[in-house]
Image (cartoon, rainbow, N blue to C red):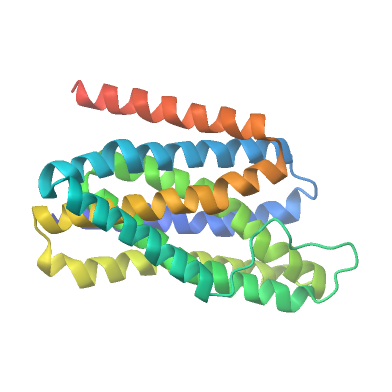
Amino acid sequence: MEGNILTALALTLFAGLATGIGSIVAYFIPKPDMRALSLSLGFAAGVMIYVGFVDLFCSSKLVIGFGYANLFFLLGIFLIYLLDMLIPHIHMDGQVDSHCNHLYRSGIMTTIGIALHNLPEGMTVALVSLADLRLGVPVAIAIAIHNIPEGLACSIPLYCATSDRRKSCLLSFAAGMTEPLGAVLAVLLLYPFLNEELLAAASALVAGIMVFISFDELIPIANRYGSEHLTNLGIIAGFLTMMAGLILMGAF
């Protein structure tokens, strides 16, 4: 179990570092290909939706029953929705205006919001990895893809307002580092009590969080960056990739 904990923390660190990657990309690629970003976000949504519904929820149902699995799934959706409502989180598709008005405050608020939203994402990667390591890797990759444009959202308004690349990058990086912090909190709070039933309940709850993030952020923003057709192609590719991956992993 200790080896799984270290692996879960490493995967979460990888996902968190992607936010910093996004801030670096903002500097060196002034006009990133929004169509590719749309496809990538759709792919990340496809992976997370498939894992949430097909694997995490179904495996949870087998251990704690259909009723309790639904209860914890809905609890996960409610918790992340409540967090989304209470935290002043500005979505990443409306940050840059042509006059750079009020961008510094906007960038700071975005960074704080993304940092706080990364906490449950870090818990998600950690708990999925502890429940089934073969799922932890694709979930970490999906969340990392999701975090790259969040790094863009943090760094672009701050850089536009201050012309300070270092400060913009550091703040964006700090927002991403709350992801492994969430994983550490999950391990510290839940590890002493981990058993099959608690892990199954956590899996259903995490499935709800992943599905909400996909429908609330990934898919709408992917549609704005590109088109619904590109987003849908990405979602289908995510489904097929996870489908093939789970089939191949089950064969060994």
Image quadrant holding the C terminus, namely top left
At horizontal 30% and vertical 53% (from top left) the residue drawn is: 73
Specify the farthest residue to the right: 99
Identify which residue, 28 or 224, lies in the foreground. Answer: 224
- Foreground: 48 or 208? 208
Q: Could you tell me which residue is drawn at 12 percent across and 61 percent down?
A: 194
Estimate the x, y position of residue 212 in percent, counting from the top left.
45, 53
Regarding residue 194, the answer to whether it shows in the image is: yes
Residue drawn at the location 63% of the way across and 70% of the way down: 110
Q: Picture coordinates of residue 89 (x, y %)? A: 59, 69
Left or right of 178 in this view: 247? left
Which x, y percent locates residue 49? 41, 41
Give above or below for 153 relative to 163. above
Depth check: give the residue in front, 62 or 89: 62
Residue visible at 50% across and 57% down in the picture: 17
* Left or right position of 105 against 182: right
Q: Which of 113 and 178 lies nearest the eye of the viewer?
A: 113
Residue 21 located left or right of residue 180: right
For the N terminus, the quadrant is bottom left
- State which quadrant residue 62 falls in: top left
* 79 versus 14 height, above or below: below
Q: Which residue of the protein is positioned furthest toward the front in this rendering?
A: 67
Tell me: residue 10, above or below residue 82: above
